[in-house]
Image: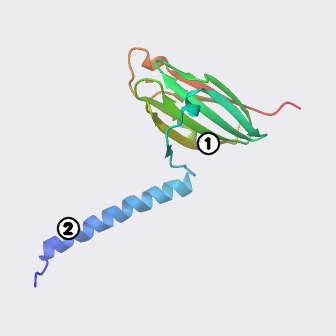
Amino acid sequence: MAVLDKYERRVLISLGATVALFIFSILYAKGRYKSDVPECLPFNKAYTEPKVNKIDSTTYQVFAVAQMWQFQPAEIYVPVGSVVDFFLTSKDVVHGFDIAEKNANMMAVYGNINKTTVKFEKPGVYNITCHEYCGIGHQNMQARVIVNYPEQ
Ligand code: CUA
């Protein structure tokens, strides 16, 4: 019968502990920072038309389309407290989609639909930035989410 060398056993135990720590860290971050892990959806041409769908007064869907060197829609207006599902795709190369203040971070990939959900609790202007180098105009590739109090 094969017996594990004591060093082998130590390596295996520390490996297991490291993997457990990684998994714990991800779950902790998900709970502590309420970060939503992005999903990958089956491709559907409907998502390649940029638009903002209002589902109800605080629920929105955004079909965000990245292409050299812009996001569409470029400006998205939602009221405070809105929950927004972003569905993201690219018309050409790989782009990034980062809303730094909301910890939202996705890749825009041609032929793919990525989805993340963001809740906007505070009014303000939230920049969406491309954070994957995509060519000569990369540094200007931005869009904005404008979160306002609803008009009375
Ligand atoms: Cu698009 Cu960088």
Q: Residue 60 lies in what quarter of the image?
A: top right
User: Do tag 1 and tag 2 residues touch (Cβ < 8 Å)?
Assistant: no
What residue lies at 51% left-to-right and 34% top-to-bottom? Answer: 98
- Give the left or right position of residue 108, taking residue 78 as reference: left
* Whether residue 88 is situated above or below residue 28 in the rendered picture: above
What residue sits right under mark 2 in the picture? Answer: 11
Q: Position of residue 115 (x, y in %)?
A: 54, 41
Figure quadrant of the C terminus? top right
Find numbered disc 1 in the image and state the secondary structure of the residue it sits on: strand
For the N terminus, the quadrant is bottom left
Q: How would you rate the neighbour count of disc 2 (Cα within 10 Å): few for under 14, some for 14-19, many for 20 or more?
A: few
Indicate yes or no: mark 2 CB to ligand 1 under 8 Å: no
Disc 1: CA contacts within 10 A as few (<14), some (14-19) or many (>=20): some
Question: Disc 2 on helix, strand or loop?
Answer: helix
Q: CA distance from mark 1 to mark 2?
A: 41 Å
Indicate how the structure is coloured in the image.
rainbow
- At x 55% / y 51%, what residue is drawn? 33
Image coords of residue 137 (percent x, y): 43, 15
Q: Nearer the viewer, residue 74 or 14?
A: 74
* Residue 44 picture location, percent across and down: 53, 36
| Residue 118, numbered label | 1
- Which residue sits at x=60%, y=32%? 63
Residue farthest toward the front in the current orientation of the protein = 45
The residue drawn where x is 56% and y is 37% is: 87
